[in-house]
């Protein structure tokens, strides 16, 4: 399942079977090849861990464009920056496992 909402990172958690589901946000833009790779990776590994992800297009918000213009894609896990530019599935799953759940 791919979820696309324009919400700020962090403070967004759902629970699946009484376990917290990690919130993953990908800041990206149209025409960004590296963004497409990161999104495809997340789609491929979505069944391997408890997370849901959403994409935020930085070009629809002038503040986000100014903040992240030269840094996309950026991946946040539970409100914390985890990756910039590149990410593979194994790296992502390791990072997700290392995030402490509250």
Image (cartoon, rainbow, N blue to C red):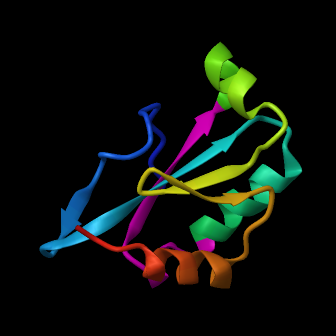
Residue found at the far top of this picture? 62
Q: Residue drawn at (12%, 73%), measured in percent from left and top?
A: 18
Q: Is residue 66 found left or right of 2 in the rendered image?
A: right
Is residue 102 among what the camera can see?
A: yes
Quadrant location of the N terminus in the rendered image: bottom left
Image position of 41 with respect to 48: above or below: above
Task: Examine the image and state in which quarter residue 27 appears.
Answer: top right
Residue 63 in the image, given as x and y percentages of width and height? 63, 18
Residue 85 in the image, given as x and y percentages of width and height? 80, 56
Q: Is residue 13 found left or right of 3 in the rendered image?
A: left
46 within the magenta span? yes
- Number of marks in picture: 0
Q: Residue drawn at (45%, 82%), measured in percent from left and top?
A: 97
Task: Examine the image and state in which quarter residue 56 appears.
Answer: top right
Image position of 71 with respect to 38: above or below: above
Residue 28 in the image, given as x and y percentages of width and height? 70, 41
Residue 78 in the image, given as x and y percentages of width and height? 41, 57
Quadrant location of the C terminus in the rendered image: bottom left
Q: Is residue 35 found left or right of 83 in the rendered image?
A: right
6 within the magenta span? no
Is residue 61 among what the camera can see?
A: no
Q: Residue drawn at (83%, 55%), measured in percent from left and top?
A: 34
Q: Residue drawn at (59%, 66%), measured in percent from left and top?
A: 43
Image position of 81 with respect to 58: above or below: below
Q: Which residues are magenta?
A: 44-57
Residue found at the far left of this picture? 18
Image position of 56 with respect to 62: above or below: below
Return the residue nearer the eye: 9 or 1: 9
Q: Is residue 23 found left or right of 4 in the rendered image?
A: left
């Amino acid at each position: 399942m791919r979820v696309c909402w324009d919400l700020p990172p962090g403070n967004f958690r759902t629970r699946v079977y009484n376990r917290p589901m990690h919130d993953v946000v990908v800041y990206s833009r149209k025409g960004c090849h590296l963004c497409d790779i990161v999104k495809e990776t997340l789609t491929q590994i979505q069944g391997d861990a408890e997370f849901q992800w959403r994409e935020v297009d930085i070009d629809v918000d002038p503040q986000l464009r100014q903040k992240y213009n030269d840094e996309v894609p950026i991946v946040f896990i539970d409100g914390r920056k985890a990756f910039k530019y590149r990410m593979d599935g194994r790296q992502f799953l390791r990072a997700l496992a290392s995030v402490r759940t509250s």
